[in-house]
Image (cartoon, rainbow, N blue to C red):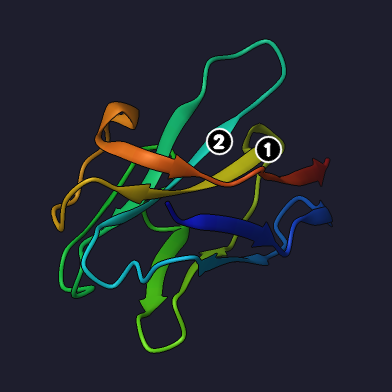
Amino acid sequence: QVQLIESGGGLVQAGGSLRLSCAASGRTVENYAMGWFRQAPGKEREFVATISRSGGSTRYSDSVKGRFTISRDNAQNMVYLQMSSLKPDDAAVYYCAAGRSPYISAWSRDYNSWGQGTQVTVSS
């Protein structure tokens, strides 16, 4: 089982940027796709971004496309989410997840390890 720890969340003004990090331990995640999901109060968890094992394929939700960038460093067992042009609607707890396969997926059922989440707050 892999343990995932997110960091980098915080309070930012609308239009600002944040970089989330996800550190994996327990086993390497280099053979698996990784993803970011988020959950706002009163809402269901939703897909944000995913990246393939090699980093060669990525997918984003329509709501963040063009503003967020997912990346990974397999040598360091790290995954990142660079968030720019943040909006109040982006406020949520952001979760890192490790996939069951090397292939990207927007479905939470395709991920079997989850972090505890990091809070992102965006002030208007």
The reply, left or right, for residue 28 in relation to residue 107 is right
Badge 1 crowding class, 10 Å Cα cut-off, few under 14, some 14 to 19, many 20 or more, is: some
Picture coordinates of residue 119 (x, y %)? 76, 44
Quadrant of residue 27 in the image?
A: bottom left
Badge 2 crowding class, 10 Å Cα cut-off, few under 14, some 14 to 19, many 20 or more, is: many
Residue at coordinates 64% horizontally, 32% vertically from top-left? 89
Q: Is residue 38 above or below residue 76?
A: above
Residue at coordinates 45% horizontally, 56% vertically from top-left? 2
The reply, left or right, for residue 107 in relation to residue 77 is left
Q: Circle 2 sits on which residue?
A: 38
Give the number of the disc on residue 47. Answer: none
The reply, left or right, for residue 124 in relation to residue 25 is right
Q: Secondary structure at mark 1?
A: strand
Residue sitting nearer the eye, 34 or 20? 34
Q: Is there a contact, CB below 8 Å, between mark 2 and mark 1?
A: yes
Return the residue found at the far bottom.
75
Quadrant of residue 95 in the image?
A: top right
Give the number of the disc on residue 93. Answer: 1
Lower position in the chain sequence, tag 2 or tag 1: 2
- Inspect the image, locate mark 2, and give the three-letter code of the amino acid beneath it: Arg
Picture coordinates of residue 19 (x, y %)? 63, 68
Q: Is residue 109 above or below residue 2?
A: above
Residue sitting nearer the eye, 118 or 91? 118
- Inspect the image, locate mark 1, and give the three-letter code of the amino acid beneath it: Val
The span from disc 2 to disc 1 (Cα, nearest Å) is: 5 Å
